[in-house]
Amino acid sequence: MHIQPSREDLIELTKLNPFLRFDDGRPKVPDDLLDRMKLVTNEEAWAILHKHEYLRQFEGGWRETHPGRKLVGRVVTAQFLPHRPDYHDAIQQAGLAEGRSNIGGQNSWVIEMLGENDVMVVDIFGKIKDGTVIGDNLGTAVQARTNTGAVIDGGIRDIDGLIKLLNVNFFMRGMDPTPIADVTLAGINIPIRIGGATALPGDIVLGTPTGITFIPPHLVREVVESSEEIRIRDEFGKQRLAEGKYTSGEIDVPEWREDINADFKTWLKNRN
């Protein structure tokens, strides 16, 4: 019994990944694409995902520790189940065999695997009371390891301490003073459900005030480049509207007229 899939299984699970991989097989989307993703909106990402028929990649309705701070990073998934004694013992023994059980509770097993630009994404079935995956101590560990944050479909505690952490944003369903209890880790880096969305290890998470989008690695570049094109076209359109050269009805349409497209190409050439 293993806590996470083998390297071979992770490669097969994410076989459309066009990038390098971590040692365990998880996709490694390049850092430069992560930086460019920080300017993308959920709506822009949704448009590309919808085009490719990835229709269940967004989940809204979150609370945040640092509203307005964008969350972007490579997904490390974890799933918890309601406690059952025989299953819990089996997981503890598996953790012992893998050298995990001497590093704290099962939520700490996940945190100890995180690296720079990773985002821990946890399915704990919406549990808030006794479902607090992190407090300020474990939140500090997440910040030190990732400088990103986490997505927790459950609870957090110690909010006063967590909001003092400046380089992270934690998305969660709620807060409670209780520690995590009566749950068992079902797996790390397995497919999980977050609300109505499916997240896989190595996805890129995009978290904004709108909500959370999980972007498969093979669509990351298209999402980023499409967003950049939209921003450039918006810059042109707003400039021409401010100049009074075109009306809003001429600019705010899916396809511009031929003369406007020609003007845009000239503007773009001069801009560069």
Image: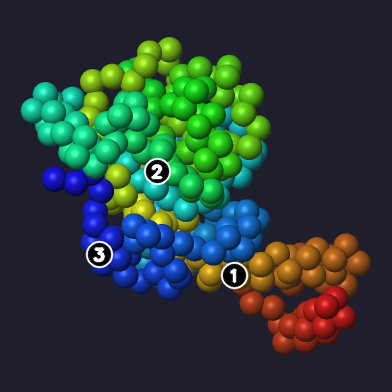
Position above or below: 83 against 192: above
Q: Position of residue 266 (x, y in %)?
A: 83, 84
The residue located at (47%, 53%) in the rendering is: 74
Inter-mark Cα distance, 2 to 3: 18 Å
Q: Which residue is mark 2?
A: 113
The residue type indicated by label 2 comes to: Met
Residue 245 in view here: yes
Amino acid at dot 3: Glu
**What amino acid is labelled 1 in the image?**
Ser
**Of pointers 2 and 3, the one earlier in the residue sequence:** 3
Which element is circle 1 on? helix
Instruction: Kindly give the residue lying farthest to the left in the view shown.
Output: 86
Q: Which mark is residue 226?
A: 1
Closer to viewer: mark 1 or mark 3: 3
Q: Nearer the viewer, residue 98 or 72?
A: 98
Instruction: Give coordinates of residue 177: x percent, y percent.
Output: 43, 12
Residue 57 point in image, percent of width and height:
40, 54
Q: Residue at x 31, y 49 (%)?
A: 189
